[in-house]
Image (cartoon, rainbow, N blue to C red):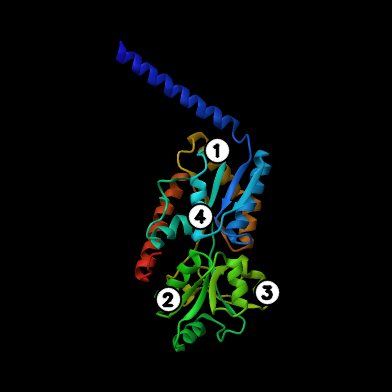
Amino acid sequence: MKKLSIKVMFAALGLSLAAHSTAQADTYPSRPITVVVPFPAGSTTDQIGRKFAEYLKGKWGANVLVDNRVGADGNIAAQHVLRQPADGYTLFMTSNSVHGANASLYKQLPFDPLKDFDMIGNIMQIPLVLTVRSDFPANNLREFIAEANKRTTPLMYGAGNTATRGGAELLKLRYGIKIEPVFYRGAPQVLTDLIGGQFDFTIVDANVVGSFLKQGRLKALAVTSEKRHTSLPNIPTVAEDAPGFRFVPWIGVVTRSQTPPEIRAKLSDVVRAFTNDPATVSFLGSVGATATPMDPTEFRTFIENDMSTWARIFSAANIERK
């Protein structure tokens, strides 16, 4: 009788928890949601985060805040998210930095990108643009490589995130050029200092650098995708010179692990709806990005593969962990 009573008790507890979780999902969201962005205002991740916040407000009528937590290649933002309750009210607009490169870049990453987060959905992938100062003595990729090879000292490049570093290191591996990074907290300051002559080049999202290119303050030499960038149709791809070269960063949404499954499902649905929305697709196309909706399982597999890619890049480039 005691054993039966215990079984009944646990069954009742399970039903109670399930009912509570369902009730939470039914009323979610009932208070403000925060979208945490790991990079500064003006970055591509920030722009997508704000577009997503606007979409949630319109879709759910919820108050949605954007919280930029900058530093340590996104690790500061990730740790902040993990200190919040696992209730779906704190969303993380993550990228190939936090959930791709950092596991291979840091000796002791203060979290596990796979175990500590629930994957919600991917939003987009975007190529990068090899960009130099307007007075740099090269007007295309081949001239850039020739200039790098004749220098007695390495070319210096500004790195505001790990995507820039990954693209630069792949160029280094492919062409054998000597380069050294100058680290920043985000892409906007990188471009300001590139114009100011603090270093030689960077590799950055086209929408971040676009206005500087139009003004003639910077020059675009090549893009890192297989196909030419829609906003820069006259700029060749690296792959046109080096077949097979491809480096395309991404942005997606995750939450803290152990978020109730019903809430995760609700979030996954709204992220997919946002990604497929014609206004989102149009905006992404205007900055040269591609909408890449994925369900949580697909997104987890995608992240696992991306982490492996970053491990190979940093290993081949002999990058010392921080």
Q: Amino acid under label 4?
A: Ile
- Looking at the rendering, in which quadrant would you find the C terminus? bottom left
Marks 4 and 3: which is nearer the front? 4
Measure the C-alpha gap from mark 1 to mark 2. 43 Å
Q: Amino acid under label 1?
A: Lys
Q: Residue at x 61, y 58 (%)?
A: 284
Q: Nearer the viewer, residue 277 or 80?
A: 80
Question: Dot 3, how many residues are within 10 Å of its Cα: few (below 14), some (14-19), or many (20+)?
Answer: few
Upstream in sequence: badge 2 or badge 4: 4
Q: For residue 254, say whether it is visible.
A: no
Upstream in sequence: badge 1 or badge 2: 2
Q: Residue 115 in the image: x percent, y percent?
A: 40, 46
Q: Circle 3 — which element? A: helix
Q: Circle 1 — which element? A: helix
**In this figure, which residue is indicated by the disc labeled 1?**
266
**In this figure, which residue is indicated by the disc labeled 4?**
76
Residue contact at pointers 2 and 4, CB within 8 angstroms? no
Q: Amino acid under label 2?
A: Lys
Query: Up-down: is 91 above or below 1?
Result: below
Q: Nearer the viewer, residue 246 or 203?
A: 203
Query: Up-down: is 127 above or below 65?
Result: below
**In this figure, which residue is indicated by the disc labeled 3?**
214
Measure the C-alpha gap from mark 4 to mark 3. 34 Å
**In this figure, which residue is indicated by the disc labeled 2?**
172
